[in-house]
Image (cartoon, rainbow, N blue to C red):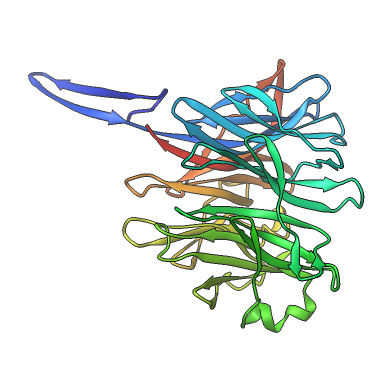
């Protein structure tokens, strides 16, 4: 067994008596983002590299934080997330490049409340896009947008001629060779319900609820949203994944939209479900990850994923019956890696990952000499050096 500790390659030689063999290794490095909670109550931004924890810089006036997306460029490691003051009443979107913190500029008239995801992508021309959501000081509504090379650009909120959404958010990003897609939702000011939308090169399009469960029950929902956009080479064509929201804004009835056709996705007997990531392995197997039940409450669900649209439950150890899965990757040999968290009604949440359904605990470590008591694993990025 070879563990990759740093960027590069190595030649491994094994010898037994007069017999010798060599193997050239270029290894996969697994990065996992998230946060840990100290016994003093601080939430501290971290990432794990092949299971080794790195605590990212905070400041005395902003001791809290979390990490979301991670990308690499050569030897550069770029982690996006948030820093916040003691009670999270003042939040700053940031990125850390090789451990150095850089605050993202918030223009006049906006503020940040944090958010679940903030991700960085770089196009072929080397332009950096960091997606996120700010809040208008005028009406406290969410404004979806992105920072292009550090400059904030709000996305269009026009639902129809003369109709401007009151609020919105981005859930997902997908780029092909010509189009930059963002997917999420906007709030229709006339119905006050979420409308699923995507932006293609900045142009907003409203997605019809089509037919099936979402459409038939639309009157009872608080709306719907696009949770993920997947396209070639992972799927044959651009596919939008939608979920509806019930009266408590819990995701329900996950659905695929491909080439104008709507296909419901099984949730194994419960209506609650959402798909955040999907991809196709080399052998044609479709793997999707999201939430069933965990979208409602962490403490009444088990971590799971879809394999060819059949629900597969991930194992949890004795004493930790509940959990959720955050994101996933697969190696060239099609080994599956899922990140997530486990817990119980009487224990703290613990960050973990699953390798081919075998669970591996991520270390909590210590912070300023104080042992950490819990943590959260969010996103994972697998880099083949």
Of residue 281 and residue 2, the one placed in the foreground of this image is 281
Q: Residue at x 66, y 76 (%)?
A: 209
Q: Could you say which is closer to the camera, residue 68 or residue 74?
A: 74
Q: Residue furthest left?
A: 18
Which residue is located at x 92 percent, y 49 percent? Answer: 138
**Residue furthest top as drawn:** 369
Q: Quadrant of the C terminus?
A: top left
Q: Is residue 125 left or right of residue 331?
A: right
Residue 374 visible to an observer of this rendering: no
Q: Is residue 59 left or right of residue 21?
A: right
Q: Residue at x 7, y 19 (%)?
A: 18
Question: In the image, residue 293 lies at what x, y percent?
Answer: 66, 62
Q: Quadrant of residue 87?
A: top right
The residue lying toward the viewer, choosing from 147 and 41, is 147
Placement of the N terminus among the 4 image quadrants: top left
Residue 32 versus residue 203 in the image, above or below: above
């Amino acid at each position: 067994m070879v563990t990759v500790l740093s960027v590069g390659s190595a030649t491994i030689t094994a010898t037994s008596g007069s017999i010798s063999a060599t193997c050239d290794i270029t290894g996969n490095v697994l990065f996992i983002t998230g946060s840990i909670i100290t016994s003093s109550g601080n939430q501290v931004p971290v990432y794990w590299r092949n299971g080794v924890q790195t605590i990212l810089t905070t400041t005395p006036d902003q001791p809290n934080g979390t990490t979301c997306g991670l990308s690499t460029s050569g030897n550069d490691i770029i982690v996006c997330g948030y820093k916040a003051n003691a009670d999270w009443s003042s939040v700053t979107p940031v990125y850390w490049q090789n451990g150095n913190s850089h605050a993202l500029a918030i223009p006049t008239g906006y503020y940040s409340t944090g958010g679940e995801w903030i991700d960085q992508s770089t196009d072929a021309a080397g332009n950096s896009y960091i997606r996120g959501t700010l809040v208008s000081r005028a009406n406290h509504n969410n404004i979806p947008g992105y920072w292009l090379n550090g400059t904030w650009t709000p996305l269009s909120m026009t639902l129809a001629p003369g109709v401007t959404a009151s609020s919105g958010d981005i859930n997902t990003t997908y780029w092909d060779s010509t189009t930059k897609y963002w997917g999420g939702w906007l709030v229709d000011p006339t119905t006050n319900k979420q409308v699923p939308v995507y932006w293609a090169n900045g142009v907003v399009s409203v997605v019809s609820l089509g037919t099936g469960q979402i459409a038939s029950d639309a009157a009872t929902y608080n709306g719907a949203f696009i949770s993920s956009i997947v396209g070639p080479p992972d799927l044959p064509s651009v596919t939008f994944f939608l979920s509806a929201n019930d009266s408590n804004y819990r995701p329900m009835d996950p659905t695929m939209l491909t080439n104008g056709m709507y296909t419901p996705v099984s949730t194994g007997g419960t209506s609650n479900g959402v798909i955040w990531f999907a991809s196709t392995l080399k052998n044609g197997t479709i793997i999707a990850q999201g939430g069933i039940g965990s979208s409602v409450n962490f403490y009444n669900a088990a971590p799971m994923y879809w394999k060819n649209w059949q629900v597969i439950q991930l194992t949890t150890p004795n004493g930790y019956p509940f959990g959720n899965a955050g994101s996933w990757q697969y190696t060239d040999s099609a080994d599956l890696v899922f990140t997530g968290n486990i817990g119980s009604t009487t224990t703290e949440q613990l960050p973990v990952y699953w390798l081919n359904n075998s669970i591996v605990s991520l270390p909590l470590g210590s912070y300023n000499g104080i042992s950490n008591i819990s943590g959260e694993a969010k996103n994972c990025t697998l880099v083949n050096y």
